[in-house]
């Protein structure tokens, strides 16, 4: 019997922040495990071993437009191919048609500024791939920087030399922070709990033991964080 119905390609959705990488809702840790990618993407159509450095391999998923690069038995980067490049080695047969979100914003490669080389920097990084003869980037490269260092003063509360909003209800303040910090992006830096845990040095915060309760140091930071009075006019509606 001939099957006239072709299999549909998998829908791939990638969420990436400075701290975390998720593919189709599955958390990806460093070092990236090939078996986990196989469970998400299926069996790769191409497995290419470098002729000179045999410890390097390239895995290609043709129908997804995705490549993964391996060195010394560990996947160190994932590439999403958005357009054809004649000089690209081991190119997948199809282009990447999935969705990519960087810091919860939908990523469109053609809308990025030509001068940008890195779209996201942190523990997880997303950079552009562009050959010298290409007019624009043809792919993005997702990789982990284990040497990334959080600035020592990032979560140090600095004196506010202007009037600030006084709060009597902490939950109400959290609503205001959500709008000003994450939606309007006026109050910076954006608070990232996982980054804060790595930054905090006065004690080791055990996320396994403390995952069911609010972390006192994080609550204390948010309670003490001043919000300038000039931002009050930006709050027109609270859901």
Image (cartoon, rainbow, N blue to C red):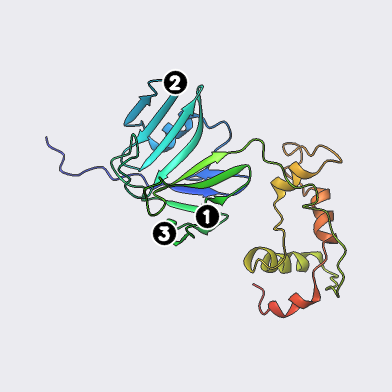
Q: Judge whether residue 27 can be spotted in this image.
A: no
Residue 54 against residue 78 in the figure, above or below: above
Residue 34 against residue 199 in the figure, above or below: above
- In the rendered structure, find residue 53 and report the number of the disc placed on it: 2
Q: Name the element at disc 3.
A: helix
In depth, the one of 226 and 41 nearer the eye is 226
Viewport quadrant of the C terminus? bottom right
Measuring from the top left, give residue 112's x and y in whole percent: 48, 59
Gap in angstroms between the C-alphas marked 3 and 2 = 34 Å
Measuring from the top left, give residue 77's x and y in whole percent: 50, 36
Mark 3: give few (<14), some (14-19) or many (20+) Cα within 10 Å.
few
Mark 2: give few (<14), some (14-19) or many (20+) Cα within 10 Å.
few
Measuring from the top left, give residue 1's x and y in whole percent: 11, 34
Q: Which of marks 3 and 2 is nearer the N terminus?
A: 2
- Answer with the quarter of the image where residue 182 lies: bottom right
> Given this view, does label 3 or label 1 mark the residue nearer the observer?
1
Q: Mark 1 points at which residue?
A: 116
Measuring from the top left, give residue 21's x and y in whole percent: 55, 43
Gap in angstroms between the C-alphas marked 1 and 2 = 31 Å
Mark 1: give few (<14), some (14-19) or many (20+) Cα within 10 Å.
few
Q: Name the residue under label 3.
A: 110
Residue positioned most to the left: 1
Given contact means CB atoms under 8 Å apart, are the residues at marks 3 and 1 in contact? no
């Amino acid at each position: 019997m001939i099957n006239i119905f072709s299999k549909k390609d998998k829908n791939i959705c990638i969420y990436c922040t400075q701290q975390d990488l998720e593919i189709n809702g599955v958390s990806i840790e460093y070092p990236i495990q090939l078996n986990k990618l196989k469970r998400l993407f299926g069996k790769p159509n191409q497995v290419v071993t470098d002729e000179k450095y045999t410890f390097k391999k390239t895995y290609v998923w043709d129908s997804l437009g995705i490549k993964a690069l391996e060195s010394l038995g560990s996947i160190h980067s994932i590439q999403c191919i958005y357009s054809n490049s004649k000089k690209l080695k081991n190119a997948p047969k199809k282009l990447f048609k999935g969705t990519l979100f960087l810091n919860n914003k939908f990523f469109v490669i053609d809308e990025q500024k030509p001068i940008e080389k890195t779209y996201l920097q942190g523990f997880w990084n997303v950079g552009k791939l562009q050959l010298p003869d290409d007019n624009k980037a043809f792919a993005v490269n997702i990789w982990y920087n284990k040497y990334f260092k959080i600035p020592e003063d990032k979560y140090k509360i600095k004196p506010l030399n202007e009037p600030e909003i006084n709060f009597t209800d902490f939950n109400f303040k959290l609503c205001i922070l959500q709008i000003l910090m994450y939606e309007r992006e006026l109050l910076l830096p954006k608070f990232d709990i996982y980054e804060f845990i790595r930054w905090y040095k006065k004690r080791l915060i055990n996320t396994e033991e403390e995952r069911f309760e609010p972390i006192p140091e994080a609550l204390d930071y948010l309670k003490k964080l001043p919000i300038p009075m000039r931002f009050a006019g930006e709050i027109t509606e609270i859901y």
